[in-house]
Amino acid sequence: MHPAFSVIFLTTLIGVGQGLFLALYTGQIYSMMKLLPAQDSQSFYALGSLLAFGFLAAGLFASFFHLGHPLRAWRSISQWRTSWLSREVIILPITMFLIALYGAIHYFAWTEPLFTIAKTQPIDLSMIIGALATIATFALFISTGMIYASLKFLQEWHNPLTVINYILLGGASGFTLAAAFSAYVGANVVGFYVLWAIILTITAFISRSATLLRNSRLKHKSNLQTAIGVRHTMIAQKAQGSMGGSFNTREFFHGKSLDKLKTVKVTFLILVFPIPMLLLLAAASGTISLPLTAFVIQYLGLIAERWYFFSEGKHPQNLYYQSVA
Amino acid sequence: MKQLALIIDLNVCVGCHACVTSCKEWNTSGWAGPMSDTNPYDANPTGTFFNRVQTFEVGTFPNTETVHFPKSCLHCEEPPCVPVCPTGASYKRKEDGIVLVDYDKCIGCKYCSWACPYGAREFDQQLKVMKKCTLCVDRIYDQTLPESERKPACVLACPTNARLFGDVHDSDSEVSKLIRENGGYRLMPEWGTNPANHYLPRRKTHLKIHEDELLRSDNPLKKEGLLPEPPKEQQTLDDIYMSW
C-alpha cells in the first residue's frame, strides 16, 4: 500500500496522546494506593492531560488531510454498526472530551473524595472520569487497529497482532513521554514512568517482531490465476488499460525499492526499541533532557514504523497492475 | 431477488477498448458529473475510468495465447467495500443488486478502495470522491430510450458481443444459461465476495482422430472380399488403397 503521511501522523500522534493519558491515570491509581507520592493536580495531571489532548487534537487535525471532502466528515458517524472507521470517528472525540474533562477536574481541583472503597481508597470525580476515559482510550486503540486488521485480503494486516501493536506502541511512546513530562515538571515519579516505558517498549518489540516474522512467511491466497481465472502458471501482463498510470497504480504501491523498505525496517527497529530504552535507563541518573530525547527518537522511529506498516501491506489488486506495457 | 450483472466472454473479446471509451463517454456526460482527467493530451495522462481492458499473455513462446481482460466493478453479492464505508455513501441496492456510491455523501477517505480486492474503484482526483461502475443505472431504466438500448453503454458498444447484461439470479435468463453451459466463473473466489459479474473462459474445439478412423479397418469392400486389392501403382479416386 501507499503510505499516506496524514494517516501516519494520525495513528502515531493519537497513540502518544492515548498512551500519555493511560500513564497519567495509572500514576494516579498508584498514588491513590499510596504506592507513589501524590502529584499536584494542576501542574501535573491538568497539564499532562492538556498535553495528551494536544496530541489527540493534532492527530485529528492530520486526519483531515486524508479526506477529499473534510467538511463532510461529520457524516462518517453514521455507519458505526459495520465500519471500524466510523467507530474510530465517534470514539476519538469522545476520548478527547473525557481526557479534557479529566484534566479540567484536576485543574479546578474538584477532587474531594466522593466515597471510599475498601474503607481506605478515596474515590473522587477524576477517578471515575479517568476510568471512563481509559475505556474510551482502549476502544480507540481497538478501532484504529481494526480499521486495518479487518481487511481480510490484506493478509499482512489481518491479524490480532495489528491491534496489539497499536496498543503497545502507543502505550510505549505515551509512557516515554510521561517520563519526559514528569522530569520536565519536576515530579518525583520519573523512575516509575521510565520503568513502565521500558517494560512496554520491550513488550512492543516482542509483538512487533512477531508480526514481522509472521509476515515474512506469509503465503498469499490470491495469485494471477485466481485474479483472471486462467489456469496456467505462466501469465504475464502486457497492458493494464492505461499508459500514464491510474489511481490503482498510485494508491496501492509504495513505489520504493526493496532496499529502501529494508532500510526503513532496520531504522524503525533501532529508533523505536533499543535507543529509547538505553536513554531511559540512563535517565534514571536524573537528567531532564534524556527522557525527552528518548521520546523524540522513539516518535521519529514510530513514523518509520507506521510507514513500513502501510508499505508492507500487499493489496491483491496489484495483481492486475504488474506491468504498463 | 434480482441481481443485475455483466457477463464477459473472454473467448470473443478482442481487446478493442470500445467498451472503455463508450463507458467513459456515457458516464462523463451524465448527471453525476464528469469523470475527470489530468493531462489528457499531455505527458503522463491519467484519469478516472469505470472500466479498463487489460491484456495478459498466457504460456511461453511459441505456445502463447493473448487474453484480453476487461475489468470493472463486479457488483459483488457480498461487497466488502460497502460495510467499511463510514458515511453510508457506498451501498448495494436491494432491488437490483447494483453497488453504487452516493457522490454527495462520499468524504473521499478511500477506505472502500482498500477494501476491494479487485481494484474496481477509482478515486476522482479532481472531484475528490470515489467512483465506480454504476452498471449505467441512469440508462438501463430510462423509459425514453427504446427497450433495446436500455443496457449499459459498454454492452451496446461491444462489437463481438463479448459483454452481456442480465439478471444472474433468474435461472432462465440468457446470462444464467451462458454461465451454466459455458463454465462461467467468478474472479478471486477465495475471498467469498461472490461477484455478480461472471467471466466465460476461452473455449477451444479439439478434433480428435484415432488411427483406425484413418485406416478404415472396417472397410466393407475388404471385409467381404468383393474387390481384389488394387496394385500399388494404380491411382485410385478414393482411399481404397489406404484401407487395405
Image (cartoon, helix red, strand yellow):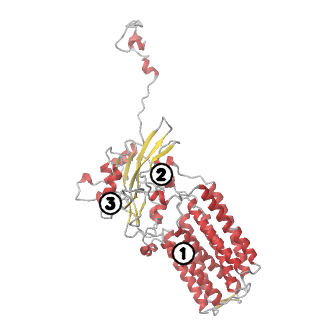
Which secondary structure lies at badge 3? helix
- The residue beneath circle 3 is B28
Quarter of the figure that contains the N terminus of chain B: bottom left
Please state which amino acid type lies under the numbered disc 1.
Gly
Which secondary structure lies at badge 1? helix
The crowding category of the residue bearing disc 1, from other C-alpha atoms within 10 Å (few below 14, some 14 to 19, many at least 20), is: many
Calculate the distance from the C-alpha at mark 3 to the C-alpha at mark 2.
24 Å
Between residue A96 and residue A239, name the one nearer to us: A239
**A38 left or right, relative to B45:** right
Residue at the front extreme?
Answer: B43
Please state which amino acid type lies under the numbered disc 2.
Tyr
N-terminal of the pair, mark 2 or mark 1, is 1
Between residue A296 and residue A121, name the one nearer to us: A296
Q: Is residue A173 visible?
A: yes
Percent across and percent down for residue B190 are 51, 52
- Give the chain of mark 3: B
Between residue A60 and residue A117, name the one nearer to us: A60
Number of dots carrying numbers: 3
Which secondary structure lies at badge 2? helix
Quarter of the figure that contains the C terminus of chain B: top left
Residue A320 marker: 2
- The residue beneath circle 1 is A59
- The image quadrant of residue A115 is bottom right
Q: Is residue B188 visible?
A: no
